[in-house]
Image: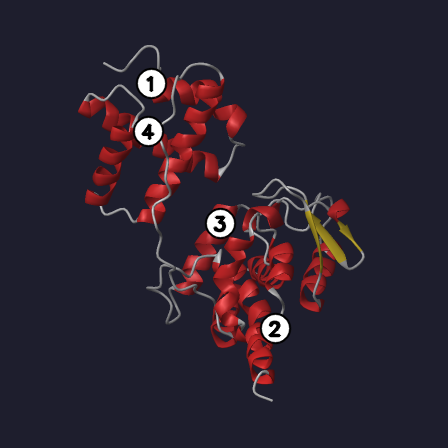
Amino acid sequence: MLSERNNNLLELWSNYSDLLWEDGKHKEACRSYIDEIYRFMLISGRAEYDNNLLDDLTIYFRQKGNRNSTINRKFASLSKLLRKHHRNGGLTKLPEFRKLPERNARIRFLTKEEEADLFGRIENIDHAYAQISRFLVETGARVGEALKLNWGDIEGDYITFWETKSYRPRTIPMTHRAKKVVEEQRGMSGRKAGPFHGVAYAKYRNAWNDAKDKTHMRSDRQVVPHVLRHTCASRLAQSGVDIKRIQEFLGHRTLSMTLRYAHLSPKHLDVCAEALNKLHH
């Protein structure tokens, strides 16, 4: 049986989840991770949250075909839950969570031709969905951030995202194309509280997939709406924008998240070659 002192994971989730996670897709994903770990502990008879549990879970997840990046996400949910339980005095000692090394997977972004093809097909399904897509690729916003925008968040040429994944609001300038989308939405808004209020993410995603199925990208699992955020970041890097500014534009919590795009902007290293060249003069 699971230890009464430690409480089982479902009890910990019930006690702390509303405090640690906001409602949404991320919370639902974390809940599924905790359920999976709970079932493993139940079937294997494990009762203690210790290093042996983490080792066995790592082996179990790998046998299921999980990559290190997926295992790290599952352990992050477990760690967050156990840290809170530990601070509340319910757990004497925390296991040692060590991040598993992750491969730097190739970042998928759309070419101009792919964008035109995909957006044109989305346009044929629903103009509003095509406009959201244009807005996302011009701002680098997450879909959820865009859908929650209120008119009060838009002032002149600037737009503020208040509800972000990092819980830190960010204000960015709008491009001409993003501003054109917003102005059109304002003209059609009626009583809507924001440019994209009333749009259901599930329906937008379905339209995206229907359009994608008609392109050469139909089998590319990375071409999901979030690819528009990668596309925006990649284009900024390719245009020579420095990594720190890209970080602020996208609202990344850490610079390491933005460094994934650094290889697309080799020009920022030119100063290194120039410095070495001067030594030979």
Secondary-structure class at tag 2: loop
Quarter that holds the C terminus: bottom right
Q: Residue at x 62, y 66 (%)?
A: 242
- Amino acid type of the residue tagged 1 in the rendering: Asn
Lower sequence index among marks 1 and 2: 1
Q: Nearer the viewer, residue 68 or 139?
A: 68
Q: CA distance from mark 3 to mark 4?
A: 28 Å
Secondary-structure class at tag 3: helix
Q: Nearer the viewer, mark 3 or mark 4?
A: 4
Q: Residue at x 54, y 72 (%)?
A: 265
Q: Nearer the viewer, residue 89 or 78?
A: 89
Q: Which residue is mark 1?
A: 8
Q: What is the x, y in percent for residue 53?
A: 26, 29
Answer whether residue 102 is visible to the viewer in this image. Answer: yes
Q: Nearer the viewer, residue 24 or 21?
A: 21
Neighbours of disc 1 within 10 Å: few (<14), some (14-19), many (20+): some
Q: CA distance from mark 1 to mark 4?
A: 11 Å
Compared to residue 107, the image places residue 202 above or below, namely above
Q: CA distance from mark 3 to mark 1?
A: 37 Å
Neighbours of disc 2 within 10 Å: few (<14), some (14-19), many (20+): some
Q: What is the x, y in percent for residue 118?
A: 48, 68
Q: CA distance from mark 2 to mark 3?
A: 36 Å
